[in-house]
């Protein structure tokens, strides 16, 4: 249990067996079936979720009911509405399982307790935040400056596993395209 | 000197007079005239810049030579290519003064020295990073899910000072619009 979680954690910080046992007390396992929600827009995001198995998507819905995928999360990734988690404001994201999934949750109060009990965990939270920031900086830069073809080809190079597991209409939503535009781009790239 | 920098810093963490004096040893003042660069794409971003006076923009240039503004920075804001600063990889941003500006620079080595000398500064760097992340999360969400009119009206509500000080073509670039589209949106909104 929590195997991948501790594998990833121990890649970044050294934990003794005692610390790992202590850490486990603060974690909450959660299973979601495909199409179940971890978080719905308007609720407060009370925990950060680490994906042990499965896949999720975080998305917003616009006034016309269109959805826009902010992030996918596969095994080993972390997903939350960090804005809501940190500020206590209502979430602007929905987070939904797109496959049956097993998660490890760290609630806000657990996070604070762990930081007190194992101060070096602070380094990990900082690295996580830095990583999240850098990923978002790259994503925004690509949205602003790349052509549709470049965005798609970047995406499949960066995340080949997602491209294989996730339906095309979700990839279109992530890239900010209509499904028709994505089909056209894929046909054009295959025929080259 | 460094007046606004320490005002902002002391809003977040308590520093003694001794610590402030110590801190000053690690800071580097820099003046830029309008149109001078703090950072050019391809160079490594070696410092984080705090704006005491003036205004800057961070932008990327696409293959066709079009520029895309990632961020404005007015008095009291911080600007850098954080990806490049943290990883040592070449910057993907250009950072240019759009008014005569006075900056306070913290180089990477200075940052590390300050963290050793004044450990509570770590909290500040974490709050800064969190703030930068949240701003980018909001920006990405708005790029993905809002109409052009909503994006413009959000922008002038959130940043009335920027809208007054910055040329319209730069606001268009920030919003991902052509200057013509922005003019049309503004005319439409004024006539309502």
Image (tube, coloured by chain):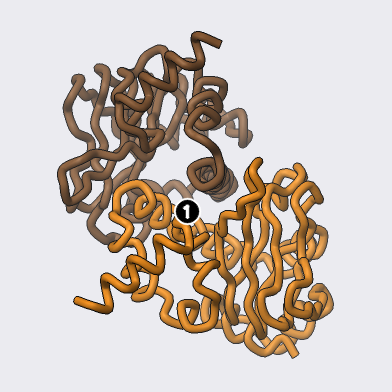
Chain colours: A brown, B orange
Q: Is residue B153 above or below residue B177?
A: below
Could you tell whether B132 is left or right of A97 in the image? right
Residue at image position (44%, 22%) is: A185
The one nearer the camera, A53 or B119, is A53
Q: Quadrant of the N terminus of chain A?
A: top left
Report the label total: 1
The one nearer the camera, A100 or A13, is A100
Question: Is disc 1 placed on a helix, strand or loop?
Answer: helix
Disc 1: host chain: A
Q: Quadrant of the C terminus of chain A?
A: top right
**Looking at the picture, how far across and down is residue B138, in whole percent?**
38, 56
Q: Is residue B6 above or below residue B38?
A: below
Circle 1 packing at 10 Å, graded few (<14), some (14-19), many (20+), is few
The answer to which quarter of the image holds residue B181 is bottom left
Which residue position is annotated with label 1? A116
The one nearer the camera, A170 or A93, is A170
**Looking at the picture, how far across and down is residue B103, in whole percent?**
73, 78
Could you tell whether B124 is left or right of A26 in the image? right
Residue A55 in view, yes or no: yes
Residue at image position (54%, 75%) is: B167
Q: Is residue B175 above or below residue B163?
A: above
Residue at image position (80%, 65%) is: B110
**Looking at the picture, how far across and down is residue B116, in whole percent?**
75, 62
Could you tell whether A191 is left or right of B58 in the image? left
The one nearer the camera, B92 or A44, is B92
Residue at image position (33%, 58%) is: B148
**Looking at the picture, how far across and down is residue A131, in whole percent?**
56, 42
Residue A26 in view, yes or no: no
């Amino acid at each position: 249990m929590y195997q991948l979680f501790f594998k990833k954690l121990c890649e970044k910080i050294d934990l003794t067996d005692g610390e790992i046992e202590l850490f486990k007390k603060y974690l909450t396992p959660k299973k979601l079936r495909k199409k179940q929600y971890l978080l719905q827009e308007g609720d407060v995001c009370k925990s950060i979720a680490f994906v042990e198995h499965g896949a999720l998507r975080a998305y917003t819905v616009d006034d016309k009911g269109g959805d826009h995928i902010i992030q996918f999360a596969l095994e080993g990734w972390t997903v939350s509405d960090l804005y809501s988690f940190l500020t206590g404001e209502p979430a602007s994201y929905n987070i939904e399982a797109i496959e049956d999934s097993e998660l490890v949750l760290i609630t806000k109060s657990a996070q604070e307790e762990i930081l007190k009990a194992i101060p070096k965990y602070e380094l990990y939270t900082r690295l996580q935040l830095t990583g999240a920031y850098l990923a978002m900086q790259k994503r925004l830069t690509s949205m602003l400056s790349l052509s549709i073809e470049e965005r798609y080809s970047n995406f499949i190079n960066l995340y080949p596993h997602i491209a294989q597991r996730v339906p095309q209409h979700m990839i279109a939503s992530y890239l900010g395209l209509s499904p028709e535009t994505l089909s056209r781009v894929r046909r054009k790239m295959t025929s080259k």
